[in-house]
Image (tube, rainbow, N blue to C red):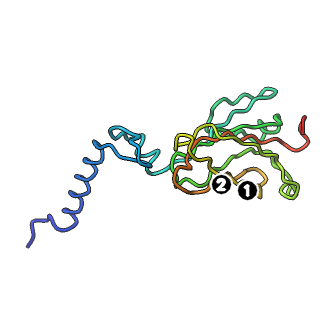
Amino acid sequence: MTNGFGISGAVLVGLLLALVAFMFSRYRIQGAIVRGPFTWRSFWGEELGAVSVLYFIRGGPVIINGSATPPTAIQASQVQKQTAQVIFTADSDVQALFTHNWGLDASAPTYFEPEILYWEQLTNAGGTYVAGLTFDVTNTNVVKVNKLNFLGTGGTFIVTLRRPQSIGQ
């Protein structure tokens, strides 16, 4: 008969001790100390990875300012341009979905629509690397924003979509 504290209990205790040590340590990325003591926000957002897409849209009666909720089809039909702040918090984050809800026709990808513009606002590597983005427009309501996956490629990108036949296009 055992006391109930077997191998699995020892493993759990070891993991708990490792987590406590990690919480109060400083650690390095690319040779520089970049973070202080552990915070749950940094752990969940940066270590486990999380992609955020915040929508910034205005035109006619539609105003969306920094919302994580994409525009509805009715809202989208009233605007010609949509902008999103796409935040890749970890190197392992490789795809974000920019939902525009324009309901483009099936031939839109053939004509490279919608028009996509982007620029990098902030890099996790302190501006050392510029991550490459690619885009998949095969869905008529969603643009897939794909990021190359290598060290230092997390960051914040501003992605703008312009609808076909919009003013200035």
Residue at horizontal 20%, vertical 57%? 13
Whether residue 159 sits left or right of residue 8 in the image: it is right
Front residue (pair 78, 24): 24
Relative image position of residue 160 (x, y in whole percent): 74, 40
- Seen in the picture, residue 97 relative to 122 is either above or below; the reply is below
Q: Dot 2 lies on which element?
A: strand
Front residue (pair 97, 147): 147
Q: How many numbered marks appear?
A: 2
Whether residue 29 sits left or right of residue 61 in the image: it is left
Relative image position of residue 94 (x, y in whole percent): 59, 55
Task: Name the residue tied to disc 1.
Answer: 136
Whether residue 8 sits left or right of residue 95 in the image: it is left
Callout 1 amino acid: Asp
Residue 146's tag is 2
Mark 1–mark 2 CB contact (< 8 Å):
yes
Relative image position of residue 3 (x, y in whole percent): 9, 66
Q: Residues within 10 Å of mark 2 (few under 14, many from 20)?
A: some
Residue at horizontal 46%, vertical 44%? 45
Residue at horizontal 88%, vertical 44%? 164
- Seen in the picture, residue 133 relative to 52 is either above or below; the reply is below
